Amino acid sequence: MQNDNHSTAQPEKDVARLTEEVREAIAHGGDIENAIRNLTLKAMHSNGLDIESLKQIATAVMKGVQEGAQQKMTHAAEQSHAAQSQITQAVVGLDTAFAQLAGASKLALEEAASKAKQFSDSELTKAQADLKDLESVFLDTLKHTATAAQGLIAETLRDMLSHAQHNGTAVGMQLKDTLAVFAHQMASTGRAQFEAGVKLTQTTADLLYKISTGVLSGITSQTNRDDK
């Protein structure tokens, strides 16, 4: 899912900025889940959709979450419960953003099919391979952050990881539908291949931007809210 407008490796300043924005979101409180989701989607739109970029985005988000929660706990012991809740919301927000990336890719394919257009076989193959790794990127980032953290933060992240591994993730649920659409589209491409007027990655990135800015809200994902 590489975005042609950006290199695979994220500029350090972009990664640092994302971490800072997430840290500030934790500090300010409010709707953490939605804030983290939007920050993640905007980073995806701006910095590329290839798997290495997505790993860096997820790592930057979780670093900001960890630093923000630690800062809040340090300042006041009574903030520990609030920080724990915000960690949970932030992880759900990241999961939702990844699910909406998968959903946007599905929507891009469906829109192309409705207009009798198809993306190139090579682009579909690359995007499909990256999408298959998407849930692993989310779970691995959560695991690595939990390993690096300490105390209540580590405990909270380990609990969330265990829950995700046993009960599934929003991105995993969405991927089932998305990959089925990819398989169908790739079969069609094999029969009658021609280039669409726009790139799949650019179409997907544009949809992500619309989701994050509230222009498009049709892509939904399941987040197991009752189990938070």
Image (spheres, rainbow, N blue to C red):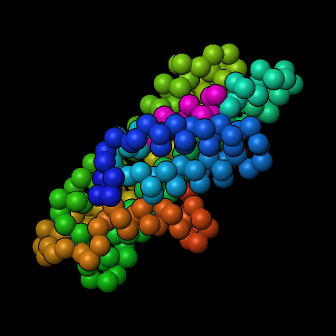
Query: Residue 59: within the magenta?
Result: yes
Quarter assignment of residue 185: bottom left
Which residue is located at x 74 percent, y 50 percent?
Answer: 31
Q: Is residue 3 left or right of residue 160?
A: left
Query: Residue 64: within the magenta?
Result: yes
Any part of residue 180 in sight: no
Which residue is located at x 68 percent, y 16 percent?
Answer: 151
Q: Position of residue 130 (x, y in %)?
A: 31, 48
Any part of residue 43 in sight: yes
Q: Position of residue 201 (x, y in %)?
A: 33, 61
Quarter assignment of residue 56: top left
Q: Position of residue 48 (x, y in %)?
A: 38, 52
Q: Is residue 82 left or right of residue 181?
A: right
Q: Residue furthest top?
A: 151
Q: Which residues are magenta?
A: 57-67
Q: Please state, as top left, top right, bottom left or bottom right, where the N terminus lies in the image.
A: bottom left
Quarter assignment of residue 120: bottom left
140 relative to 123, above or below:
above
